[in-house]
Amino acid sequence: MKHLNQRITLRLRLVTGMLITLMLTASTGITRAETVPTDQMRKVRNEFQDKKFGIFIHWGIYSMLGDGEWVMHNKKISPEEYAHLADGFCPSLFSAREWVLHFKEAGAQYVTFTSRHHDGFSMWNTAASDYNVMKATPFGRDVLKELSSACAQEGIALHLYYSHMDWYRPEYPTGSCKNVPHDASVANWPAYYAFMNRQLTELLTGYGPIGAIWFDGMWDHKEESFDWGLDEQYQLIHRLQPRCMIGNNHHSTPHDGEDFQLFEQDLPGQNTAGFSGGQTVSTLPLESCQTMNNTWGYSITDKAYKSSEEIIRRLVRAAGMNANFLLNIGPRPDGQLPDEAVKVLEDVGRFMQRYGKTIYSTRGGCVPPQPWGVTTQRGKTLYIHILNNEKDGRISNEGLERIEGHLSLLLPKGKYSVKSVKRLATGDALTFRHEAGGTRIFIPARPTTDMTDYILEAALN
């Protein structure tokens, strides 16, 4: 009888899904015509670039196992058994406002929250499935609603991660990420596609202004052999919220309709993590997402946290390469941020409070990245970030030269002219001279402060 009921439920679900697809297409007027960014969207993209720093949150029932967000897949846990995690999910110490205050004090301008990860569990009160934080857990609170409210109160933009891939739903056509199949698995893409669009409609109509939808998981199927229906889905999003941007972590060159380009665990143009080999750097706004330790979701054994100094330098390097920096945190199953993460946020906040003007609303400087660091620029003000500092209080010599007994750096010749240079922390004027190869700036050999990022400010003609 149990299996008969499962089959009947599945058939009803599939039929309903196909009807929803037809209704969505009819009601939204979605077509496959190319999406052209409006003037409004160009403005939104520009505002996004001004923000420069965001926080990424990976949190769900997978956090309870303390082994990262891929634990269901990596441990080959069946969907039926994995679903029992929801029975015990009750993060008694969760406070959306406390989270947002930490993010705001760190200087973050937006939050990207995992509304639904690859495990298929929804972290909001979705009507499209009972497999969600309100209906399937004793917690019984709409996490996303609380986070949306806290962000609105503190002036922090809310972005939403949403997985295209699903290890739980039986109608999702499993791709390259093999997993223990659902007992009732019968692949039906139209039904699954309709389910996703129904959820996206909920997210974009019930949780206030959403700054961006951050897609992931499309790489589960090869693009040339699988139609993800991006045209229809992207137009649905832009129709529901015209100011909502779209990014997709598909690790390839951006598709039409996408508003910013993502780089996972790397800066634009780099591929040290092995994810970005198939994409070139586009003219869209750029975002580099990186972890504090090695995992995205909470791992009880992963204590390989990067130092605050390294995180700050990554943020600065991203800005110098004309990209936003999205720093990930995996909250504990009790709902609190790890102590190590809070410490980093506090340190980043102190830096941004003092030097945020060299990051916010800037673009990559007219001087491209150099061995000694990067530059950022606002109008005719160039910020020179020397990032190869050593802990003993001296600037290392990489990319620098000792000339006439003084340490110096050479700004390569370009379409700019320097008229003054000062050390930002003190306002002290620095000596410089124009040479055949560019502009040489002489800097103190042993600065005693600001060793994480030694910043010069140059006025350009």
Image (spheres, rainbow, N blue to C red):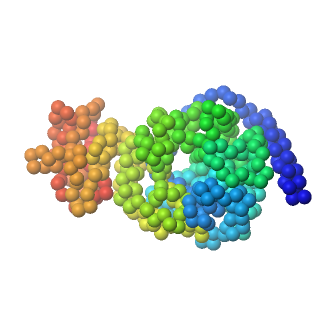
> Which residue is outermost to the bottom?
92
Q: Is residue 310 left or right of residue 289?
A: left
Q: Is residue 395 visible?
A: yes
Q: Is residue 188 left or right of residue 351?
A: right
Where 261 falls versus 90 (above or below)? above
**Which quadrant of the figure contains the N terminus?**
bottom right
Q: Position of residue 157 (x, y in %)?
A: 55, 52
Number of numbered discs overlaid on the protein picture: 0
Q: Is residue 50 left or right of residue 41?
A: left
Give the residue displayed 27% in from the left and 32% down from the top.
414
> Which residue is outermost to the right?
1
Q: Is residue 145 left or right of residue 245?
A: right
Choose top left, top right, bottom left or bottom right for residue 244.
Answer: top right
Q: Position of residue 277 (x, y in %)?
A: 47, 38
Q: Is residue 108 visible?
A: no
Where 204 falls versus 77 (above or below)? above
Q: Position of residue 387 (x, y in %)?
A: 30, 51
**Which quadrant of the figure contains the C terminus?**
top left
Q: Position of residue 206 (x, y in %)?
A: 70, 52
Give the residue displayed 40% in from the left and 56% down from the top.
311
- Identify which residue, 177 or 243, lies in the foreground: 177
> Which residue is outermost to the left?
404
Give the residue displayed 19% in from the left and 33% down from the top.
437
- Identify which residue, 84 or 338, lies in the foreground: 84
Where 278 falls versus 424 (above or below)? above
